[in-house]
Amino acid sequence: MLIVTLQRVIVLTALLGLLACGGDSGQDSEQATSMNRGVTASEVVLGVYTDLSGPTAIWGVGATNAARMRFDEVNANGGVHGRQIRYVVEDTSYQVPKAMSAANKLVNRDEVIAILMGVGTPLNNAIMPMLFESDVLNLFPISGGRQMVEPFHPLKFTQRGIYYDEVRAAVKYFVEAKGRTTPCVIYQDTDYGVEILEGATHQAEAMGLSIAEVSAHKPTDSEFTAAILRLKNADCDFVLMGTIHRDTILVLEAARKMGWDGVDWIGNNAVYAQVIAEQESGQGFYSFVHMARLYADDDMSPQVKAWWDRYIELYDEEPGLAAMEGYRGADLTVLALQKAGPDLTTESLAKAVESITDYTDIFGYRVSFGPDKHNGATESVLSQVQDGRWVTLEQAISY
């Protein structure tokens, strides 16, 4: 009996040894080298849920194109620490249910290490809990909502200005630099619009002022005559706008038809678009943004000109602000991957982003992070519509 038992032990031991040493596919072997999701010996997997076909597709398409452009450049030169960067893109059409489905695929099937530049405040808010439960980073979302950095979380970072900070900078600037004294607010009754109202109110109170009049509307509203009349009767000399493209145009058009002059209309990243600049009523409109867009006849550095020409060659259209933000977000990610070293984990990647403290992109804008600072942008650019295009008036206005 003892001999038989010993023989069985020997056979079982040999079989276990064979299973441990042989019979593995290349994929299993590759996965075995990784201690972290989204990382193998040959690649690192990033993903994004974005809008390629919905109302904010101008942001999703531009940012995604430019990110792919940057990753292709890096991959053509050997990748990062011998790994190719794979960027998995899922279209949401700016719908939360589609975004949830896309995020579930990216997290559970593609096993991404990070989501990079997901578009939209409501989509990011809905999905971030899933990401953090799965130890997935949310890097540089295309959103200026405070929730992108507040409350603090070790896995969320943003590279763009926060709407709340931008509107506070706007109030401060127009009071101190332009002598304005009577602020008003018109805003969409949404999370985004309320953030504009709160920022304007808090900054006005901090400067000993009060908001003279407030007007709220639904995103689908089309008639603004009564709202503009209330603001005018309150003797506003500057109006902070929590609006997006469509309602911005309608509000400015209503003010123009009413003949209301001598008032400054001020927006933020959400309304910084050429469609606003092209409107007759958009003349003189201001916007506080994290970076100013380029035009073909601008005086570009050789590096930026090469980037501009390459983007047109690849995508047959001029790059806008979304492409600038997408390229920078991808470049920041490449830098973080380099800093994280070959032993890549979610934790090491997060710490690598925190170590980026003095970064300037190819367009000349600064970004800085730290262990307790996950909002990389702390300055705004003031732009104004002049003769159908955005013109930069002030650089590096601090929050």
Image (tube, helix red, strand yellow):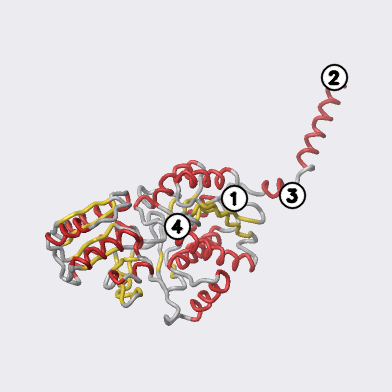
Residue under label 4, please give it.
Answer: 140
**Residue 305 relative to residue 281: left or right:** right
Q: Secondary structure at mark 2?
A: helix
Disc on the earlier residue, 3 or 1: 3
Q: Residue at x 44, y 42 (%)?
A: 129
> N-terminal of the two: label 2 or label 4?
2
| Left/right of residue 78 with respect to residue 265 in the rendered view | right
Measure the C-alpha gap from mark 2 to mark 1: 49 Å
Q: Earlier in the sequence, mark 2 or mark 1?
A: 2
Q: Amino acid at mark 1?
A: Gly
- The residue that mark 1 highlights is 38
Q: Secondary structure at mark 4?
A: loop
Residue 113 vs 74, above or below: the answer is above
Res 12 seen here: yes
The residue mark sitting in front, 2 or 4, is 4
Dot 4 or dot 1, earlier in sequence = 1
On the image, the x and y values in percent for residue 322 come to 45, 64
- Residue 137: image x %, image y %? 49, 50
**Few, some or many C-alpha atoms within 10 Å of disc 4 (few <14, some 14-19, many ≥20)?**
many
Q: Amino acid at mark 3?
A: Gly
Horizontal and vertical percent position of residue 281: 28, 69
Q: Identify residue for label 3.
A: 26
Q: CA distance from mark 3 to mark 4?
A: 33 Å
What's the CA distance linking mark 2 and mark 4? 65 Å
Q: Which tag, 3 or 2, sits closer to the chain's start?
A: 2
Please rate how many residues cluster around mark 1, counting C-alpha atoms within 10 Å: few if below 14, some from 14 to 19, many from 20: many
Q: Which mark is residue 2?
A: 2
Q: Is residue 159 above or below residue 39?
A: below
